[in-house]
Image (tube, grey):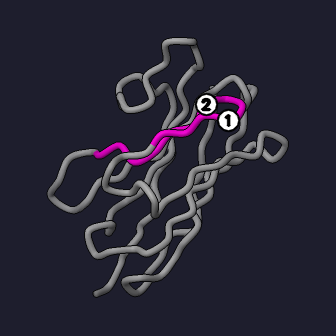
């Protein structure tokens, strides 16, 4: 079992930055690939970014590429999402998720993730 707790959300003006954190507890954090997803009001779940267990491979949705950066610190059992140049369309609840790592893991597929956090609200005002 892995417990995930997000933090760092809030209200920010367009063009601003936020850094989300996701702290993990329970089983070995380094066994899991990690992902960030978001859900805007009235919309479905959208994949944002993922990172492998060692942190040397990362993946981004086209909508955030060049603006968001995912990273992880396995010593601190934490994954981060640095969000720069935020836009109003980035407003959503952001959730982190953990996927048991296998060579053919699926960074973008939400149903492949085993554990989820509760989410943190990010609101970007224009």
Q: Nearer the viewer, residue 40 or 105?
A: 105
Give x and y (percent) for residue 20.
57, 62
Near-viewer residue (65 or 4): 65
Q: In which quarter of the image is the C terminus?
A: bottom left
Q: Is mark 2 on a helix, strand or loop?
A: loop
Q: Considering only vertical position in the picture, is 42 above or below 51? A: below
Which one is closest to the eye, mark 1 or mark 2? 1
Q: Is residue 7 above or below residue 14?
A: above
Query: Which circle marks residue 56 in the picture?
Result: 1
Q: Residue at x 17, y 53 (%)?
A: 43
Label 2 CA crowd tier, 10 Å (few <14, some 14–19, many 20+): many
Q: Residue at x 37, y 83 (%)?
A: 14
Of all residues, the one furthest to the right in this rendering is: 75
Q: Does the magenta stretch include residue 91?
A: no
Residue 57: x and y, percent? 60, 34
Identify the residue at image location x=20%, y=47%.
44
- Give the residue at the far front of this rendering: 66
In which quadrant of the rendered view does residue 111 lie? top left
The image position of residue 103, as x and y in percent, is 56, 12
Binning the other alpha carbons within 10 Å of mark 1 as few (below 14), some (14 to 19) or many (20 upward) gives: few
| Residue drawn where x is 62% and y is 58% of the image | 21
Residue bearing the label numbered 2: 52
- For the residues bearing labels 1 and 2, Cβ distance under 8 angstroms: yes
Left or right of 35 on screen, residue 61: left
Q: Residue furthest top?
A: 103
User: Which portion, as a residue range, is magenta?
Assistant: 46-59
Apparent side of residue 32 relative to residue 48 in the rendered image (left or right): right
Residue 15: horizontal and vertical position, in percent? Answer: 41, 82
Quadrant where the N terminus is found in the figure: top right
Q: Determine the CA span between mark 1 and mark 2.
A: 7 Å
């Amino acid at each position: 079992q892995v417990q995930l707790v997000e933090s760092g959300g809030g209200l920010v003006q367009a063009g601003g930055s936020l850094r989300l954190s996701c702290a993990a507890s329970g089983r070995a954090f380094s066994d899991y690939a990690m992902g960030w997803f978001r859900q805007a009001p009235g919309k479905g779940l959208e994949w944002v970014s993922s990172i492998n267990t060692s942190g040397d491979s990362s993946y981004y949705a086209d909508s955030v590429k060049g603006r968001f950066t995912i990273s992880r610190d396995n010593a601190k059992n934490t994954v981060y999402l640095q969000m720069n140049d935020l836009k109003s369309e980035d407003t959503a609840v952001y959730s982190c998720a953990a996927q048991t790592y296998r060579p053919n893991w699926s960074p973008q597929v939400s149903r492949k993730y085993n554990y989820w956090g509760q989410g943190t609200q990010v609101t970007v005002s224009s």
